[in-house]
Structures are given as structure tokens and as C-alpha cells.
Image (cartoon, helix red, strand yellow):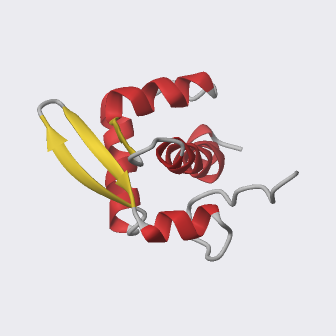
Amino acid sequence: MPMSEYENNHVRPDARLTILKALAAQTDERLHSGFIGDELRAFGIDRPREWIHGELDWLSEMGAVTLTKAGSVVVATLTEKGHRHLRRAIVIEGVKRPSRPGE
């Protein structure tokens, strides 16, 4: 499988799910892109800030997050649609499905 195909079919959907889970784990359901980068690196997804911003823009276009620019970082906030994907109530195409509880 060519690298770009692997990136689009595996890395990006997994990163998007990781981002949504990281936001849901916060008391206020918000994180800035620097912390999101740290979270992705913990799961072996080491990408530059521009890549992370692109994924946040994509999640925003899908309605899973809202974004606020804060200097050189972007603050992402989880939306109800993002929550619904994490609860497996809906599917956002392009975001990996979360495992069922207990799996």
C-alpha cells in the first residue's frame, strides 16, 4: 500500500479519533493544538503542527469540533456531534470508529 494511501486510510482516521477522545477527556472538552500534538505522539503519530491544524480544520468542517485561533495555536472544543461519534450513536466518515465499551 503506498504511503499516502496508508496515511489517508489508517493514520488520519486514527488521529481524528485520538483527537476527539483527548478532547472528551478534558473537564472543559478543550485543548490547544500543542497539547493535541503531545497526545498524538503518545500514540505514535508524530506530525508537524501544520498537519495537526489541517486535521482540526477537517474535524471542524465535519462538525465534530469548533476552533478558536489563539496566536500560533488553535484551540479545539468538542461538539455534540463529536460526542455522538464517540458514543457510537453516529458515524463520521473519515474518523475511526471507537471500540465498544469493554473491548
Q: Residue furthest front?
A: 27
Which quadrant is home to the N terminus? top right
Q: Residue furthest bottom?
A: 90
Q: Is residue 71 above or below residue 1?
A: above
Image mark count = 0
Which of these two is toward me, 52 or 19? 19
Does residue 20 show up? yes
95 vs 34, left or right, is right
Q: Residue furthest right?
A: 103
On the image, the x and y values in percent for residue 28 come to 38, 47
At 24% from the left and 40% from the top, the residue drawn is 74
**Quarter of the image holding residue 99?**
bottom right
Does residue 48 show up? no
19 vs 65, left or right, is right
At 40% from the left and 68% from the top, the residue drawn is 62
On the image, the x and y values in percent for residue 92 come to 55, 70
Which of these two is toward me, 94 or 73? 73
On the image, the x and y values in percent for residue 96 come to 65, 56
Which of these two is toward me, 18 or 25? 25
At 44% from the left and 43% from the top, the residue drawn is 27
Q: Is residue 64 above or below residue 46?
A: below
